[in-house]
Image: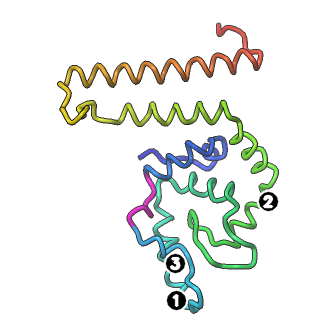
Amino acid sequence: MHRMTSTQARHTRRAVLQSTVDAGARCATADPDLWFRADDESDADWQTRRTTAQRICAGCPVRAACEELALRNGDGEPDTDELIRAGYTGPELAAVRTAQAVRLAAAAEADRDTEGRQLDTLTTELHDALASNPDRKEAGQRLPSDRAQAAQNNRLRVLADQIRQIRTARRARAGWGVAA
């Protein structure tokens, strides 16, 4: 899996970040309780589990995307060590969120861009369709490979056309001329 850098994550929309995390997070196969402190858990027990969680996060290929999502979601409290997200404790996330408040506000505004969200969704669908096996069943019957491939190719064309139309319209509204 391709590792996303922090800079790339900062310039990526929420839907793509979430898709990236869903597709490649190392924590997906671990116990979800590992990342959250239990009620009345001792400091020593939490320290042990927190260290284990941070170790898993340290080698995760989608850590930057996870961190960006955590910041945009407002995860972590400044005075409560109750979770681990992207290898950071709650207070660490809160400190980063405070330091990057202006950037995060702009990212949240960009995430609200309906057309941009649609573009992100279509791009994710296109990526998923490219990665899927064209041999599939339809109405309980296995489609012949050539029909399945033709159906997948048609779906890819439709998605690519929709993406191209949105991008062209956005570029025109932004005053971009015809590319040289």
Count residues near mark 3 (Cα–Cα under 10 Å), then give few for <14, some for 14-19, many for 20+: some
Would residue 172 appear left or right of 150 to someone viewing this image? Answer: right
Magenta region: 24-29
In the image, which disc is placed on residue 99?
2
In the image, which disc is placed on residue 51?
3
Q: Secondary structure at mark 1?
A: helix
- Spatial separation of the CA atoms under disc 1 and disc 3: 10 Å
In the image, which disc is placed on residue 45?
1
Would residue 144 appear left or right of 156 to someone viewing this image? Answer: left
Q: Is residue 142 magenta?
A: no
Dot 1 or dot 3: first in sequence order is 1
Circle 1: residue type = Asp
Dot 3 or dot 2: first in sequence order is 3
Where is residue 154 shown, x and y percent of the image? Answer: 37, 19
Contact between marks 3 and 2 (CB within 8 A): the answer is: no
Q: Secondary structure at mark 3?
A: helix
- Spatial separation of the CA atoms under disc 3 and disc 2: 25 Å
For marks 2 and 1, give the one nearer the viewer.
1
- Spatial separation of the CA atoms under disc 2 and disc 1: 30 Å
Would residue 152 appear left or right of 50 to someone viewing this image? Answer: left
Circle 2: residue type = Ala
